[in-house]
Image (cartoon, rainbow, N blue to C red):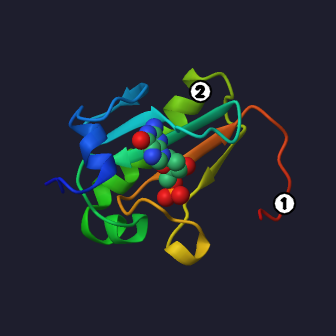
Amino acid sequence: MTDPSCLFCRILAGAIPSEQVGQNDLAVAFRDLDPQAPTHVLVIPKVHVATLPELAASHAEAAVAVLTLARQVAIEDGVGDAYRLVCNNGSEVGQSVFHAHMHVLGGRAMTWPPG
Ligand code: DGP
C-alpha cells in the first residue's frame, strides 16, 4: 500500500534517490537529506501510514520492525547503543513528512530537553 503523492513512498519506489543503509521485511532505512548528527538515518515502514502511533495501532509488526531496524542501523553505523530515537508526531512539533518515520541520531553529544 503506497501513496504516489507521498515523498517517502516515492523514495521506497526508487523514484527519488536516497542512500539506503538497511532494510528488513517491513521497514527501510536511509540517510536524512539534512543530517543533524554524524549518524542521522530515517527508518520508515514499507506500508504508507501517516504517523508512527497510527502505524502501531494498525500494523504493529511494522512498528516493531521500524524499531528493530533502527537498532541494527545504529550498530552498523558504529554508534552502538548510544543513539537518540526521535519521532516528530504532528506538524506542531516538527513533522514535515506524513509517512511514519523514526529519526536515528548519534555520533555526537546531545543535550536535553530537545528544542
Ligand atoms: P520530519 O520533519 O520529522 O517529518 O522528518 C522528515 C525528514 O525527512 C527531515 O529530517 C528531512 C528529511 N527529508 C526530506 N526530504 C528528503 C529527501 O528527499 N530525501 C531524504 N533522504 N530525506 C529527506
Q: Amino acid at mark 2?
A: Ile
Measured from the top left, where is residue 95 in percent x and y?
Answer: 51, 65
Q: Left or right of 108: which side holds 98?
A: left
Q: Is residue 7 above or below residue 58?
A: above
The answer to whether marks 1 and 2 mark residues whose Cβ atoms lie closer than 8 Å is no
Q: Residue at x 42, y 59 (%)?
A: 97
Q: Residue at x 36, y 66 (%)?
A: 56
Measured from the top left, where is residue 26 in percent x and y?
Answer: 27, 43
Q: On the image, numbered disc 2 is attached to which residue? A: 75
Q: Left or right of 27: which side holds 39?
A: right
Residue at the farthest left position: 1
Q: Is mark 1 within 8 Å of ligand 1?
A: no
Measured from the top left, where is residue 109 in percent x and y?
Answer: 85, 40
Q: Residue at x 23, y 35 (%)?
A: 15
Task: Please say whether residue 17 is visible from this viewpoint.
Answer: yes
Tell me if mark 2 has few (under 14), some (14-19) or many (20+) residues whose alpha carbon lies within 10 angstroms of its own. Answer: some
Q: Earlier in the sequence, mark 1 or mark 2?
A: 2
Q: Amino acid at mark 1?
A: Trp
Tell me the mark number nearer the camera, choosing from 1 and 2. Answer: 1
Numbered disc 2: secondary structure:
helix
- Across the whole image, how many numbered discs are drawn on residues? 2
Q: Is residue 74 above or below residue 103?
A: above
Measured from the top left, where is residue 46 in percent x and y?
Answer: 26, 46
Q: Is residue 67 above or below residue 91?
A: above
Task: Please say whether residue 69 is visible from this viewpoint.
Answer: no
Instruction: Give the image quarter of residue 83.
Output: top right
Q: Is residue 48 above or below residue 21?
A: below
Q: On the image, numbered disc 1 is attached to which residue? A: 112
Q: Quadrant of the C terminus?
A: bottom right
